[in-house]
Amino acid sequence: MLALRELRNNGVVKNGETQRTTPVAADAAGAAPSRAATASAQDGEQHGTRQRVARSILDHGPSTAAELADRLALTQAAVRRHLDALAADGVVEAREKRVYGSRGRGRPAKVFALTDGGRDAFDHAYDALAVEALSFIARAAGGGERGAAAVLAFARERARAQGERYRHRLEAAGEGAQERTRALAEALTQDGYAAMARTAPGAPGEQLCQHHCPVAHAAERFPQLCEAEAEVFSRLLGTHVQRLATIAHGDGVCTTFVPSAPSAGHRPASSPVPETPTTATPRTAGRNPA
């Protein structure tokens, strides 16, 4: 669709930046721009703002119109117009806002999340290749349980190497759960996961939120990718972690709960991440790997 192609062509639009339209030059006689040229410039500005709205949802996860308006310095009416257009193009969809704890009176707030097609518009072009490669690994190992074990071995090696790149950053952050979780979120963000850490609602600990997953489609088919990632998070953070939601399972955000106190037998990694993590089993699903 047109909107998805435009997002692809635009590349990654940094949150907070305003796309500038190219001024329409007057003709040789100094006449004012034509109506068609003016309309074209206005359309370009509208598309640029629409892309900022989509990028803000990608970076921050499912958002209300009020949250988007505040982030982008727009009116709620303007945001709703852009959301309606994005929804019509299949880029975003409305969902009921998830409420933690008891729900108050009144109707729940509506949030807007990117659809699979909306995520594809950013950087999922190589995801099909990942699925094909993992499928080949599973077949080459004999399929069935052997194939699943081979995919898990690959996923663990990939996650181990990723965790090794993050280890020094987390060591410098100290041993507190909050400091290490936030350092991990910063490292993940640099790798394209649009991650953030915040105090967990209703429980002592932190919540690690990944608003984007570059391999979401592959993880939907092969949950071993989520499983291995959570194992390395546990090793890096020195505590049992619990996956509450994943993009691969249709949630708007990958959410991981990190308890504030280290678990028995867990210590923050101060040496290279081991090749065989011990916090999950090969049978573990993507949502709650431990």
Image: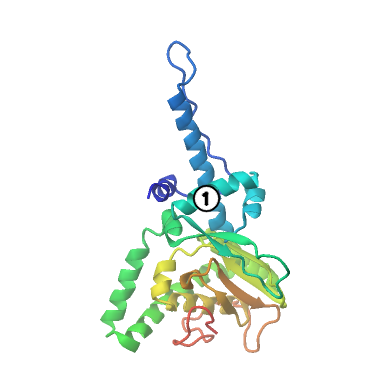
Q: Quadrant of residue 260?
A: bottom right
- Can the viewer see residue 273? no
Residue at the far front in the pictured view: 106
Q: Residue at position x 52%, y 69% from top? A: 251
Number of dots carrying numbers:
1
Q: Quadrant of residue 36?
A: top left
Give SS at disc 1: helix
* Observer-nearest of 53 and 257: 53
The residue lying toward the viewer, choosing from 174 and 183, is: 183
Tell me what residue is drawn at x 66 percent, y 53 percent: 66
Which of these two is toward me, 199 or 46? 46
- The residue shown at (31%, 75%) is 135
Is 67 left or right of 163, judged from the image as shown? right
Establish if 2 lies above or below 138: above
Closest to the observer: 54 or 272? 54
- Residue 254 in picture, x, y percent from top left: 54, 69
Identify the residue at horizontal 48%, vertical 12% (top origin): 30
- Where residue 230 sits in the image (x, y, percent)? 53, 77
Residue at numbered disc 1: 84
Residue extending farthest top: 29
Image position of 276 with respect to 55: above or below: below
How many neighbours does mark 1 have within 10 angstroms: few (below 14), some (14-19), or many (20 or more)? Answer: some
Q: Amino acid at mark 1?
A: Asp
The answer to whether residue 38 is left or right of residue 97 is left
